[in-house]
Amino acid sequence: MTIKNKCSVVGAVALMASLVSPILAADTAINVGALRFTSHAASFVAFERGYFKDEGLDVTFKFFQAAQPMAVAVASKDVDYAVTAISGGLISLAEKGAAKVIGGALMEEAGIDGQKILVSDAAYQSGITSPAQLDGKSWGITQAGSSFHYMGAKVAEKEGISLSYKPLQKTGAVIGAIKSGQIDSWSIVPHIAKPLSGAGAVHIVGNVADYIPDYQVTVVFTSADNAANEREKSEAFLRAFSKGAADFNAALVDKTAGEEAAEAMVKLIHQYVYTDRPYEKAAPSIRNGAMRISADAALNTDSVQDQLDWFIGEKLVKDTITIDTLVDSSYSAN
């Protein structure tokens, strides 16, 4: 895959990560924000395999149910580092000098199964079998200015249709609404989309990648203070996170690590994802939902710019905000 302006985070420091001892005092405590999604696996792997510990970081996870509350938690320093989608809330906090993006995480990639466009069973039975037929229909979002809002808008723009956006605050509430037919459509990562579709509650009618190629779905971010004044800690986090991503990609995305490694990876992720299900039932969803996590926390700045342009165009954030307001490019090297 070729992406313009794709930046590899932590540059030469990352290349020497395996050759140096941690530069932080042992057991530097940090809180890491996450969702219980397979897409957050890099953090889980880094924790379970000791990569954070190797970097001198003592990690405690704090779990959220939507992107914007996580951004607020980072800005208030209740959370030190987090991985989630770019939202209007995150951009506004960056504009206020409270948050900075320092790397990339989940991404859409040609040839890798990605996020799905769903319709409710009621909508499907009424004849809606493609995104082009959603004109005037409802689309579930957590909040206005969320990634779900951005994805819906991109689908609508390309199809030349209009959607009615229904904010439901939490991912779980959106799932309940589309299963019950209270909303007509939604988009979500494959490890959630496929089981819902397999159970007949919803139907997959398209792929987000067909509407937003090379979409930088989630990013690594921290407080502006951490980015500016805690560089050693921030680089240590990115190194450990990148090792976790490499293990995940090899085991479940590229499938170059072998079946034993894939099984071990699924078991590790199951400690955090689908914990209410027996392993035998959770494993297929975890495997089938594996999307690429950017190597070395690389950030697709073209995609970030496109998202920022959309937020500005929708008047969800100030038109004076630039990509430099949102992204601390000192953590990347071309």
Image: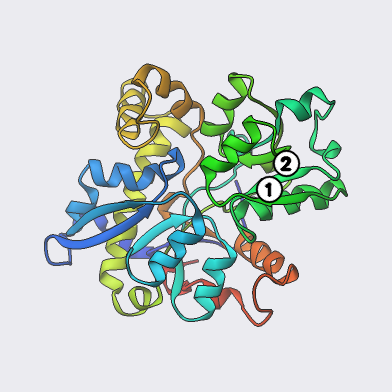
Q: Check contact, mark 2 vs mark 1: CB within 8 A.
A: yes
Residue 301: name its quadrant.
bottom right
Residue 311 in view, yes or no: yes
At x 70%, y 39%, the residue is 183
Residue 49: name its quadrant.
top left
246 to the left or right of 31: right
Residue 103 in view, yes or no: no
At x 79%, y 38%, the residue is 131
Q: Position of residue 129 (x, y in %)?
A: 80, 28
Mark 1, residue position: 213
Mark 2, residue position: 210
Q: Which residue lies most toward the left here?
A: 26
Pick the front one: 163 or 299: 163
Q: Is residue 256 above or below residue 47?
A: above
267 to the left or right of 107: left
Q: Residues within 10 Å of mark 2 (few under 14, many from 20)?
A: few
Query: How many numbered discs, if any?
Result: 2
334 to the left or right of 115: left
Q: Residues within 10 Å of mark 1 (few under 14, many from 20)?
A: few
